[in-house]
Image: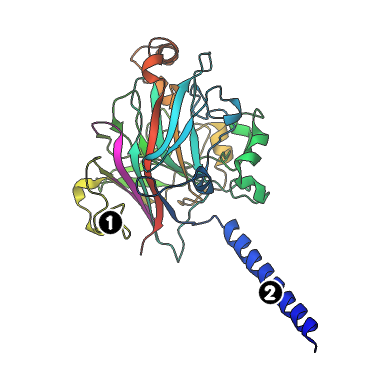
Amino acid sequence: MNNSTKIFLISLSILSLSSIVCIAQTDKLLNYENHFFYLDFNNQKYDFSEVEKYFFTNFPHDDPTLGDVIYDRMKWVNDDMIKLSEFDGLYGFIKSRNDTLGFDSFRFTSKPYYNLNDDVQKILFVFKGKFPSANGVWPAWWLNGSRQDEWLYKESIQSVSDEYLGKYSGIGEFYNTPSPVNCTDWPAAGEVDIIETINGNSIIHNTIHTCPQMCDSEWNDDGVIINCANATATDPNSGCSGKSYKVDSPEGTFACLWENNSFRFYYWEPDYDVRSDGGPLSKSPKPENWSESFLKNHVRFLETKTKCDSNSHQDWQCETCRGMNKCEFKNLKMIFNITFCGKWAGDEFDETDNSLINCKEYILNEGKDAIDNQYLKMEYVSVSKLP
């Protein structure tokens, strides 16, 4: 074998090896299930591309809660809606559009989705930062699941890009347009609300939403069994809730621990040392060592005998929930968003019969200056597998 032949064969071997490596890397990137990560904006410098590895920053659909916001980046009229400040945080702003549509706002949806299984039996979600608090404002951090192909990127690898989401802009309402950031089978794979507060009251709510025939719940070992679709007799969609708790303002460190048939919700005030050994922002969080004072709610799930029927529930709900007879949460993605008024903040804006109308008039007129340019500040976010 001459030297030229040897060089050719060696080059061919290297090329083949490179191809194998590339394929392996691509396959790894395609697996978004249980992709654990952290973004520590206070201590590390990131490019915005790093944020978009883990989060969609566009929601090209109407607000499902009927709030007065535009989440679709292609329809924003304001600049600098999302800002990454070096060694400070990721900011999402709410800005007046100066029109009847209300405000430009944001909705961040995690690209990874999460499931418990034999290898992953505990998942910890952590957020440190600040949400705005004002009349008419409804901020939230929550988990939402779906079984739809679009949600799980089965239709195309391109579906994990914001550019791909652009094709949905202006097409269809939220309830008939499934996409990687929007599902139409809610609540058949479960929803978990970690932070929700409305109208500047700084009262934090923890709520679970499932189909009627999926889950009953017991909160904080109080002996009361609540169905997670029917917390009240008059509203089949209100879910099941723990004890609401008051904070000085919706900022600090919040965490949610997901285990088999259970969620635990925690809160630390802004100046608490959450980076110490075993803390929620440490390299090895140890919830078993956290003080009970930080545990705000604990929900335990049970199978239910409740059925979805036309007397107690809405037609769309029973259609969506057909066949969902097991208490399980599937393919949960993290969502951060801020909306205005809508089904909850609007309905409880005041005690009049015109609460929703009054809310809309307030944010567009009297309250606009106070609300304009408020923001979410994300200092730290993580999802980790615990032993």
Q: Magenta residues, as a range?
A: 247-266
The correct choice, above or below, for 158 with respect to 371 in the image is below
The residue nearer to you, when weighing 147 against 284, is: 284
Compare marks 1 and 2 and give the one earlier in the sequence: 2
Q: Is residue 284 visible?
A: yes
As for residue 254 lying within the magenta part, the answer is yes
Residue that numbered label 2 is attached to:
14
Most extreme residue toward the front is 3
Q: Is residue 312 visible?
A: no
* Residue 92 horizontal/vertical position (percent): 44, 33
From the image, state whether disc 1 or disc 2 is nearer to you: 2
- Which residue in the structure is indicated by mark 1? 287
| 131 displayed left or right of 82 | left
Is the N terminus in the top left, top right, bottom left or bottom right quadrant?
A: bottom right
Residue 144 is tagged as none
Marks 1/2: CA–CA distance: 47 Å
Secondary element at tag 1: helix
**How many numbered discs?**
2
Residue 258: x %, y % from top left: 38, 53
Give residue 43's position: percent from left, percent from top: 35, 49
Q: Quadrant of residue 164?
A: top right
Question: Amino acid type of disc 2?
Answer: Ile
Q: Main secondary structure of the magenta part?
A: strand
Residue at 36 percent across and 17 percent down: it is 370
Q: Where residue 210 sits: x, y (%)?
A: 46, 42
| Above/below status of 112 relative to 170 | below
Classed neighbour count for the residue bearing mark 1: other residues with Cα under 10 Å, few (<14), some (14–19), many (≥20): some
Query: Label 1 amino acid?
Result: Pro
Query: For the point 30% across and 52% down, which residue is it?
Result: 280
Circle 2: element type: helix
